[in-house]
Amino acid sequence: MVRSLCFVSVVLLVLCHAAWVFAQTGGGSTYYDLGVFAYEDADYADAEQNFKKALELAPQNAVYHHYLGKTYLKMQRYEAAETHLERAWSLDAALPDLAYDLGFLAYKQSDYKAGTRYFDKVIKEEPTHVLANYYGGICLYQQKRYKKAAARLLTAAEKSPSLKVNAYYYAGICSYYSGEDGDALEKMRFVKTNTESESLQASAAKWIERIESAGRERKPYSLYARLAYAYDDNVPLEPANQEDLFSDESDSIVTGYAQGKYNLINRRDLILGAGLSHYQTWHQELDEYDMTGTTFNLFSQFGGRPLSFGLSYQPALFRLDDEDYLLRHQIRPEMLWAVSRRSSLRFGYRYAINDFRQDDDRDGSTHRGTIDFVRRFAARGGYFLAGGGYEDNTADESDYDYGRWELKAGLSGDLFWKIRGSIIGQLVGKAYKNEDAFYGKTRDDARLGAFVTLSRNIYREWLGLSAEYSYIRNSSNIDDFDYTRQVVSLGVTAKF
């Protein structure tokens, strides 16, 4: 009897152990297999239940967590998917497709940086992984990393004909923002021709129009000229905006201005070019004040949205009454920040070396910093601008040292009868540094200015008329430097 009881006890222990082992392995794997079958049949509710039962029997199984996370991903239950996919990653990061699924989850949650990290892991092991390249490219596109995004998207397009149209669409946008308009146009035309989606076709058509328009606007050359007749009630003696001396006499003046430039490199992300401008006046009576100003310009612009940078070198020669008056060399770096689609900030700096050919005491240098804000309006093609700056001028003779600050604000837009108008107000303060330079006093001026312009095309877009009016009122703590000046002009403009 005792021997029989011992035998039964041993059998029961063996059966219990076998049941426990089955529960930990065979039972979990059975539910896992059933879950996979349901997942492949797109029966995600049944798949969820089976994977959950499998995890109850084997809670540390990375594969079960992975598949339950994949199921929640299909069900768009992203928080639940994140819980199980990250648990699987902590248990076994080497599971096949796990890095891709985590990347796709991050893409769906708009966490594009995390998506990029996971897709990079996939592509490192399998460079031609189609979906990792496609979604990885879109994640990079969303981060404005256009060059790398385009490369990923094109890899996906080469390997998958079904994804080619969509991949080309995003790659085309990347090419546009990278300054490669020809490549962008080619891809958008492919999308428009080959897509079956009406909305995608319409979107591609809009991009084609935008790219072609941008190409016209960014032609490699530009020419502008204006010839005007003006009346000036207080002719200035200084041709270089020194604002020191005025003639206290009025005169009628013919003014001419011409400017041309050519971009040797003319891409959206890089422009290198050269230009030349010339300004000249012919006075009716005060011909001793006839002046010319000629400026040569070497310039560059690089970058894109939201930041672009520019650098130019501008030597200029001013002549007064057919004699050299001022030779100026300028270096002008600047930065443009596109704050939003319609708003931008421009930061500028100018360093100038001034060589007054007939007055060595005034030779010196100028430092000037500026900041300008522009807000464009959707209606009437207008904009609002505001800005300011400070200039510090030093000369060999300290009598000509001064600091100058400026504030300005204005509006511009289309008015009526195709007339475009602008008005700008300006407030300037100018303080000389030498206390004894002017009658034993430190000269301190404040100047108020208003500038109004009206223009209209009269033949196509290249020939137009313009009218300008300016008013300046300068107030000084030294009465001799109080003055007002008004100028009215009517001119013909041409631009190409």
Image (cartoon, rainbow, N blue to C red):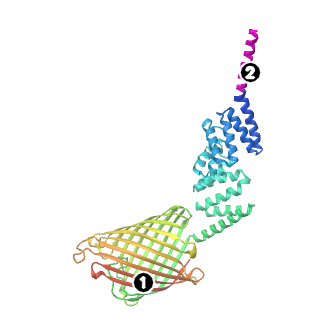
Q: Is residue 397 at all visible to an observer of this figure?
A: no
Q: Secondary structure at mark 2?
A: helix
Q: Residues within 10 Å of mark 1 (few under 14, many from 20)?
A: many
Name the one closer to the observer, 307 or 12: 12
- Say whether marks 1 and 2 touch (CB < 8 Å): no
How crowded is the residue under tag 2: few (<14 C-alpha within 10 Å), some, or many (20+)?
Answer: few
Q: Residue at x 74, y 53 (%)?
A: 162
User: Could you tell whether 472 is left or right of 262 in the image?
Assistant: left
Mark 1 lies on a secondary structure that is strand
> Residue at (36%, 82%) from the top-left corner?
236
Q: Position of residue 487 (x, y in %)?
A: 42, 85
Which range is magenta? 1-21
Q: Main secondary structure of the magenta part?
A: helix
Q: Residue placed farthest to the bottom in the image?
A: 285
**Residue tagged 1:** 281
Quarter occupied by the N terminus: top right
Q: Which residue is mark 2?
A: 15
Q: Position of residue 197 (x, y in %)?
A: 74, 61
